[in-house]
Image (cartoon, rainbow, N blue to C red):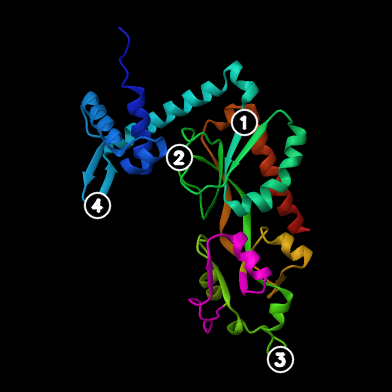
Amino acid sequence: MPFRLPPLPALRLFEAAGRLGSFKAAAAELNVTPSAVSHAIVGLEQALGTELFVRGPRGLSLTAAGADYLTYVSEALSLIAIGTQRLPNRRSTRSIAVSCAPTFASRWLMPRLPAFIERWPKVTVTVDTSRGQVGFPVDQFDFAIRMSRAPVAGLAWVKLLGEQLVPVCSRSYRSRLIDGQGNVDLRRARLIHVTSASEGWQAWLEARAIDDVDVKAGIRLDTLELAFAAATLGLGVALGRRPMVDRDLQDGSLVELYSEPLVAETAYWLVSSENADRRPDLRDFKRWLIAEAQAIGDERAE
């Protein structure tokens, strides 16, 4: 007698709700109503004879049984997605989907993609810069490039690039910061903050033992790209992040205020599911990205 499986649609909703920790977020991701998610989960719990979630005043959380079950459901959905992509009639339309931040996409990934496409012309690469947590492979992404201090359990993480923090501004703005002794006086500067960055001016100032600069004042922007643009326009001093700011330094639109950069605690990581290496095209893309990142490290060492 064949084993009776739970309904696949309910498992799909359970995976999203468990991963996101919210019926509402799962509903938005899957384009259904929160009520539909809630009813499906209740039906799944009844069919399984166990509670999967704890519904409390502080929100939704997985039970011990639910957390354990989620690992199996996520893996099963991952295998289904991979198997579907490996079907012969799917190979002609296969693409590689990458999620990353807008500045990383425009300043690091996009300038390198022509070389990848020239080498693998039959592979289509899709780059998505919308923010949000990515679930593999249910969100249809193959890779995500994320900033983090360390890898997170449950996925395959490979460190791509470290960052170096250095204050930058336009050449004309720098001249306004020079004191009578010819030194840069950062107290005269308008600081440009990036609200999405995990390490900012506070970290840089503390590392340099500078405590007389008002870190709360200045301009606040939500992307590195906007911060670099504001600095180029002479609106203040941005905390440049190498290698993202390298092209501005090379063309002279921005200059460094201090010669010694600060090594950031965070880095760019390439994240994928544990099963990504089963596809040859994903293995090629992963190896190519790592090689491109390694080349930057080699250039810095010279």
Where does label 2 land, which residue? 154
Q: Residue at x 57, y 21 (%)?
A: 86
**Which is nearer the eye, 274 or 123?**
123
Three-letter amino acid code at the position of disc 3 = Gln
| Image depth: mark 2 or mark 1 in front | 1
User: Could you tell me residue 218's position as x and y percent?
Assistant: 53, 75
- Looking at marks 4 and 3 on the same chain, the residue that comes earlier in the sequence is marked by 4
45 sits to left or right of 277: left
Check the picture and name the quadrant holding the C terminus: bottom right
Where does label 4 land, which residue? 58
| Image depth: mark 2 or mark 4 in front | 4
Judged from the image, the secondary structure of the residue bearing numbered disc 2 is loop
Residue density around tag 4, few if under 14, some if 14–19, many if 20 or more, within 10 Å:
few
The reply to whether discs 4 and 3 touch (Cβ–Cβ < 8 Å) is no
The reply to whether discs 2 and 1 touch (Cβ–Cβ < 8 Å) is no
User: Could you tell me residue 51's position as x and y percent?
Assistant: 22, 34
Three-letter amino acid code at the position of disc 1 = Ser
| Image depth: mark 3 or mark 2 in front | 3
How far apart in space, not on screen, are marks 3 and 2 (Cα)? 54 Å
The reply to whether discs 3 and 2 touch (Cβ–Cβ < 8 Å) is no
How far apart in space, not on screen, are marks 4 and 3 (Cα)? 57 Å
Q: So how many labels did they put on this image?
A: 4
Judged from the image, the secondary structure of the residue bearing numbered disc 4 is loop
| Image depth: mark 1 or mark 3 in front | 1
Q: Which residues are magenta?
A: 209-238
| Image depth: mark 4 or mark 3 in front | 4
65 sits to left or right of 214: left
Where does label 3 land, which residue? 181
Three-letter amino acid code at the position of disc 2 = Gly
User: Could you tell me residue 136's position as x and y percent?
Assistant: 48, 36
